[in-house]
Amino acid sequence: MKVAIVGGGLTGMVAAYRLLQNGHEVTIFEKNEQVGGLLSGFKINGTYLEKAYHHIFTTDTEILNLIEELGLSDKLQWYPDKTAVYFEHQLYSFSGPKDLLTFGAIGFADRVRTGMVGLWLQKDNNWKKYKAIPAYQWMKKWNGKAAYQVIWEPLLKGKFHNYYQHVSMAWLWARIHTRGNSNGMLGYMTGGFQQLIERLEIEIKKLGGEVKTKTFIKDFDKLKKAYDKVLMTGPVKGVTYIGAVEVIFTSKQSLSPYYWHNINDPHSPFLALIQHTNLVGTKEYKGEHVYYLGTYVPHEHHLFQAEEEKVKKEFFMYLSKIFPEFKEKEVTQSFVFKLANAQHIVTTDYQVPSYETVEKNIYQANFAQIFPEDRGTNFAVREGNKIAQIIRE
Ligand SMILES: Cc1cc2nc3c(=O)[nH]c(=O)nc-3n(C[C@H](O)[C@H](O)[C@H](O)COP(=O)(O)OP(=O)(O)OC[C@H]3O[C@@H](n4cnc5c(N)ncnc54)[C@H](O)[C@@H]3O)c2cc1C
């Protein structure tokens, strides 16, 4: 069979690899200069770094198996999660149940209640009953207004913006369930996840596959004529996506003892501050600290539309409110990345798109099919494996 794959993100790359292993002919068409999609990296101080922060969990068995299969296990390191919440000018450690019990932003009874709700969601395996319920309503009811407003509303608003009231509780169930059942360690590939993409590209080419970058596919009819089957891995028609805006910078300054910071303040232009080097160390980055300031916004939002310098200015101004010691003149490099289709909106009536399309021999696989789990690299590998199997049948 001759198969065309549109999109060289992780899903497309894995699907191509599996089809080639089964003796089919595969060509990947990727519109960008490099393959990797949302996982792709760029060089910073000589080392690959993802354009959007990435780590994996110990429960991510699909990607862990792939890393092992490709002989890259020695690059994968595990680190203890160090999360904090920024609320009303204060940073609170927020890495586990002990931190929740001392989380002074809400009263003691609310902390206990939040812990109990978390435990309930962690133990409950039946996500389907949450599907039709808006996450904000369920969380407000069971956690109480104070905990909802301090902890959960900023997360929902930050991730889904003006769509947050439509998001299904099944999505939040999955997020809490998965994290609660992993062991609090976060995995990162020393030297960047781009190495996984590069290794896949090498294996694909070794097996006779073709990778055509800088090739935007507009006209699917031509592909349909030239190939037996076509797989599209880009955005799915009918699904709403929002974008992500990331400011990355390097500095000798270390601002925080934590890796991940949820910025639970409605005035902040960014949802998360990630001091990447507090997870993985500064060795790979010539001794400098690497930071991400990231948020999700609809495409029409001013941050998505604004020039890069304006985005940096707005983010850095707010960063100096959180850390008054932050000195912009100490920033050695800074970058802005805008990722157009970064997150699908998983509403209470969300219909998971099918793999088959209305047209015979045309298939689609995209993270829009990931539900109720939060889309992630582990599921991209799972979807890539699965769609290759479907195409083969
Ligand atoms: C801000 C952010 C943080 C994240 N953090 C994590 C994390 O910590 N851990 C984790 O596991 N996951 C994380 N993810 C999710 C993870 O990156 C994605 O789930 C995964 O990379 C999706 O892969 P994909 O191949 O399905 O989609 P994509 O990566 O979107 O790939 C689709 C590809 O298709 C190409 N394409 C689309 N249309 C066309 C066309 N017409 N012609 C040619 N090419 C086309 C695109 O350019 C793209 O390369 C994060 C994502 C974001 C945005």
Image (cartoon, rainbow, N blue to C red):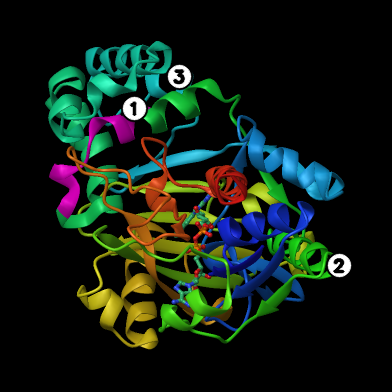
Q: In the image, residue 320 lies at what x, y percent? A: 38, 66
Secondary structure character of the magenta stretch overall: helix
Q: Residue at x 63, y 78 (%)?
A: 34
- Secondary structure under tag 3 reads helix
- Give the answer, above or below, for where 12 lies relative to 123: below
Q: What residue does disc 1 label?
A: 173
- Secondary structure under tag 2 reads helix
- The answer to if 167 sits in the magenta stretch is yes
Label 3, residues with CA under 10 Å away: few <14, some 14-19, many ≥20: some
Give the CA separation, mark 1 to mark 3: 17 Å
Boundaries of the magenta span? 163-173
| Occupied quadrant, residue 219 | bottom left
Marks 3 & 2, CB-CB < 8 Å contact: no
Label 2, residues with CA under 10 Å away: few <14, some 14-19, many ≥20: few
Nearer-N-terminus badge (3/2): 3
Q: Amino acid at mark 3?
A: Pro
> Could you say which is closer to the camera, residue 135 or residue 30?
30
Q: What residue does disc 2 label?
A: 206
Give the CA separation, mark 1 to mark 2: 41 Å
Q: In the image, residue 110 lies at what x, y percent? A: 23, 18
Residue depth check, mark 3 versus mark 2: number of the one nearer the observer: 2
Q: Residue at x 46, y 78 (%)?
A: 336
